[in-house]
């Protein structure tokens, strides 16, 4: 009995349950909309979450996960949830919910050595996902803060530069040599 | 227009099942990151709005005057009498739900109070309670609710989570203009001095100095001259645009975002180059140095004051008509409100292109022509020499900026221009463009950094459609005709689709434009090589 085959047979059911648990974090009306509307352009949140959970499921049940595929799938979810006012632990919380869902499916084979071994490997996979999700979440938040800081800085700075009130050291060209020459002469 | 459902279909679409939870009971926490900073007294005072002093939306107790309920009631009454549209919008909604899932803020958040129907209900419930017989007698049973301080907080939270883009209105079978509901909500909040600084400061600066940032006349002139220096470096041609020149045929007005922030600045350079190539008899104004009108996001009085400056300047200079740049909400003000506020502008002439002879009858009353109409007409009459291959490194898609698309129906002209100046153009999916276009997520004065999260999640539906054409066709440039778009898209794209840049249409026009006497171009307006490979080779 191969646990991976068993899980693949129940793929749709498991992912749907996982998806339901993820969207339960939203308001009732929001969750209903995210689930019901199938057009990806009318419902980018729901469809992206669903697609990425599917992709992530395919990886997490493998013994050898594809790094790029994992990153891509987690990024899709975390990028959305990190700008939706979730607590950091909640924004990466979708990773926690897959473990009980899978364990539940394999419960009745709990005594099987192969299943036991598989579940240990699954734990290691989930840990890897968590680390990746944390990094990606922080990357997203850093980007948001960077945008805020840049907007605040650039609003006036561009004006000052353009009006010549600020003379910055040029990137390249003659001026740079002039400046260097000047400071050498001092 | 969306195809209207037949009466039977509409009736059947009405969901009579009451929601499991009453929307009034859903909490609306006011928390940091969700609200924009409040307006400063100095900016309110100059516009003669009430000044509440220093406060924060996070405060438990807001600085409301003792008679705040009376102020809101009387303000509401006055507006119901003044605007028949408001009364109709308050009475007509049958809660069919057609608008519910069309708002980008709802799509991005799942927050039910961001459904346009519920957002309007925030105001409508007070209307029912205070102004309808059924509501006065039956109260809650008739959908009414009492005006409390919590309601005021809720208004502030959600009327400043609406970008007045009017996408929802396209789907409303009754044509309820939810943006106008938001406008009324904001007007009422203004009566208590509750506004946001990102809106009020530009309004005050525009009123006093002439533009959103308070850029003074000499600085404006120097900045335009700086653009001319850049243009000379790129084309070898020396441009000498005039300022405040009496007797010019045309007054050109564009949003200040086009001359103080990249990438809008390249669009401004594009205008200058186009006018030079045509030998157009036009002038810029240091007084009407702002096309944007944040008054629209404040109150009709503020909007009227700011709009009147453009026409006062046109009159003072004695021009024949006004040409307007790539701005978004300016066109809603011009097309839908100017005529009854400050019009008709009968001291001006019906705009006629001096190059093609085309008379712009659509602007017969406002006397103001959109630059993409003007340029499309030039191209149609073969008046421009163009080399679209200069834009070959760009695979372009077009974002229909909300107000030009929905408030003036400007759908074909921008596409016509782009297709004539670029060889690679790809449309986004049908339900995300034209009149169904998605907002950038930062419109109506929400383009401020403290609500960056809100802007990013609200802009997701637009970015998601851009990502689709990026993945499918390799699109790497998003064109638009709105200065707020040009400011909002760079971070939005960098977050969701980092490979896509932002441009105004006239930047693309000027790249392709062959000007008499110009030297061979080696770079585009951004001083980047005309071909992608050369950029990469340079870096290598």
Image (cartoon, coloured by chain):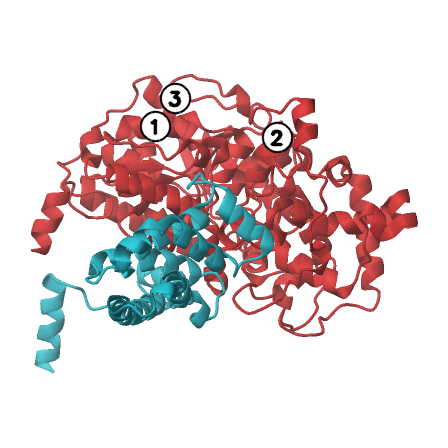
Chain colours: A cyan, B red
What is the spatial separation of the Cα atoms under label 2 and label 1, in whole angstroms? Answer: 29 Å
Residue at image coords 50%, 47%: A35
Query: Are the residues flagged by discs 2 and 1 from a single subunit?
Result: yes
**Residue A175, position as x, y percentages in the image:** 14, 64
Chain of the residue under label 2:
B
| Residue under numbered circle 3 | B377
What is the spatial separation of the Cα atoms under label 2 and label 3, in whole angstroms? Answer: 23 Å
Above or below: residue B410 compared with residue A58: above
| Residue under numbered circle 2 | B345
The reply, left or right, for residue A35 in relation to residue B149 is: left
Q: Which mark is residue A41?
A: none
Q: Is residue B355 visible?
A: yes
Residue at image coords 84%, 65%: B67
Query: Are the residues flagged by discs 1 and 3 from a single subunit?
Result: yes
**Residue A68, position as x, y percentages in the image:** 21, 58
Q: Which is nearer the eye, B243 or A30?
A: A30
**Residue A166, position as x, y percentages in the image:** 30, 67
Q: Is residue B213 visible?
A: no
| Residue under numbered circle 1 | B417
Tell me the SS state at disc 2: loop
**Which one is earlier in the sequence, the residue at label 2 or at label 3?**
2
Tag 2–tag 1 contact (CB < 8 Å): no
Q: Which is nearer the eye, A76 or A153?
A: A76
**Residue B253, position as x, y percentages in the image:** 47, 40
């Amino acid at each position: 009995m191969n646990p991976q085959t068993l899980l693949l047979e129940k793929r749709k059911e498991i992912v749907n349950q996982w998806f339901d648990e993820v969207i339960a974090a939203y308001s009732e009306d929001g969750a209903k909309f995210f689930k019901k509307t199938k057009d990806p352009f009318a419902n980018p949140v729901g469809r992206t979450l669903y697609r990425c959970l599917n992709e992530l499921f395919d990886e997490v049940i493998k013994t050898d996960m594809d790094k790029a595929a994992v990153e891509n799938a987690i990024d899709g979810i975390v990028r959305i949830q990190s700008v939706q006012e979730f607590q950091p632990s909640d924004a990466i919380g979708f990773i926690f919910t897959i473990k009980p869902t899978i364990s539940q499916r394999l419960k009745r084979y709990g005594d099987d050595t192969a299943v036991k071994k598989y579940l240990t490997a699954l734990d290691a996979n989930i840990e890897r996902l968590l680390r990746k999700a944390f990094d990606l979440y922080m990357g997203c938040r850093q980007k948001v803060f960077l945008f805020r800081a840049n907007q605040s800085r650039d609003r006036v700075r561009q004006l000052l530069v353009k009006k010549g009130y600020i003379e910055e050291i040029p990137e390249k060209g003659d001026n740079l040599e002039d400046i260097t020459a000047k400071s050498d002469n001092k | 227009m969306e195809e209207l459902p037949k009466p039977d279909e509409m009736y059947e679409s009405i969901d009579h099942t009451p929601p499991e939870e009453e929307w009034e009971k859903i909490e609306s926490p006011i928390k940091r990151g969700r609200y924009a900073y409040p307006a400063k007294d100095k900016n309110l005072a100059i516009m003669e709005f009430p000044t509440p002093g220093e406060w924060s939306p996070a405060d438990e107790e807001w600085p409301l005057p003792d008679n705040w309920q009376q102020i809101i009631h009387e303000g509401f009454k006055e507006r119901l009498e003044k605007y028949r549209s408001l009364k109709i919008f308050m009475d007509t909604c049958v809660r069919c739900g057609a608008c519910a899932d069309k708002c980008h803020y709802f799509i991005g958040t799942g927050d039910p109070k961001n459904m346009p129907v519920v957002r309007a209900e925030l105001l409508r419930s007070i209307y029912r309670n205070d102004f309808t017989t059924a509501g006065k007698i039956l109260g809650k049973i008739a959908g009414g609710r009492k005006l409390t301080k919590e309601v005021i907080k809720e208004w502030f939270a959600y009327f400043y989570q609406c970008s007045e883009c009017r996408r929802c209105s396209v789907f409303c079978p009754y044509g309820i203009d939810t943006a106008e509901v938001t406008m009324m909500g904001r007007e009422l909040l203004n009566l208590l001095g509750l506004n946001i600084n990102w809106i009020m400061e530009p309004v005050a600066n525009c009123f006093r100095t002439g533009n959103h940032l308070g850029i003074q006349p000499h600085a404006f002139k120097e900045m335009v001259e700086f653009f001319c220096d850049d243009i000379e470096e790129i084309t070898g041609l020396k441009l000498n645009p005039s300022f405040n020149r009496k007797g010019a045929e045309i007054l050109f007005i564009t949003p200040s975002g086009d001359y103080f922030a990249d990438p809008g600045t390249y669009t401004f350079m594009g205008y200058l180059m186009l006018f030079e190539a045509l030998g157009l008899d036009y002038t810029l104004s240091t007084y009407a140095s702002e096309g944007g009108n944040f008054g629209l996001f404040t109150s009709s009085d503020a909007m009227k004051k700011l709009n009147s400056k453009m026409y006062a300047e046109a009159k003072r200079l004695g021009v024949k008509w006004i040409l307007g740049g790539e701005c978004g909400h300016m066109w809603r003000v011009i097309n839908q409100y100017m005529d009854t506020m400050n019009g008709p502008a009968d001291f001006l002439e019906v705009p006629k292109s001096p190059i093609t002879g085309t008379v712009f009858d659509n602007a017969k009353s406002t006397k103001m022509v959109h630059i993409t109409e003007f340029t499309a007409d030039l191209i149609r009459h073969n008046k421009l020499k163009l080399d679209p291959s200069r834009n070959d490194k760009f695979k372009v898609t077009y974002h229909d900026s909300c107000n030009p698309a929905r408030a003036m129906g400007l759908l074909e002209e921008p596409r016509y221009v782009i297709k004539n100046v670029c060889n690679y153009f790809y449309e986004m999916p049908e339900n995300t463009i034209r009149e169904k276009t998605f907002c950038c997520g930062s419109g109506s004065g929400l383009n401020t950094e403290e609500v960056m999260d809100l802007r990013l999640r609200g802009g997701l539906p637009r970015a998601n459609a851009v990502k689709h054409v990026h993945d499918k066709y390799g699109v790497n440039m998003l064109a638009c005709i709105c200065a707020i778009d040009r400011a909002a898209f760079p971070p939005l794209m960098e977050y969701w689709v980092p490979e896509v840049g932002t441009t105004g249409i006239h930047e693309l026009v000027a790249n392709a434009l062959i000007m008499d006497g110009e030297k061979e171009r080696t770079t585009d307006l951004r001083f980047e090589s005309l071909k992608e490979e050369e950029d990469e080779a340079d870096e290598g």
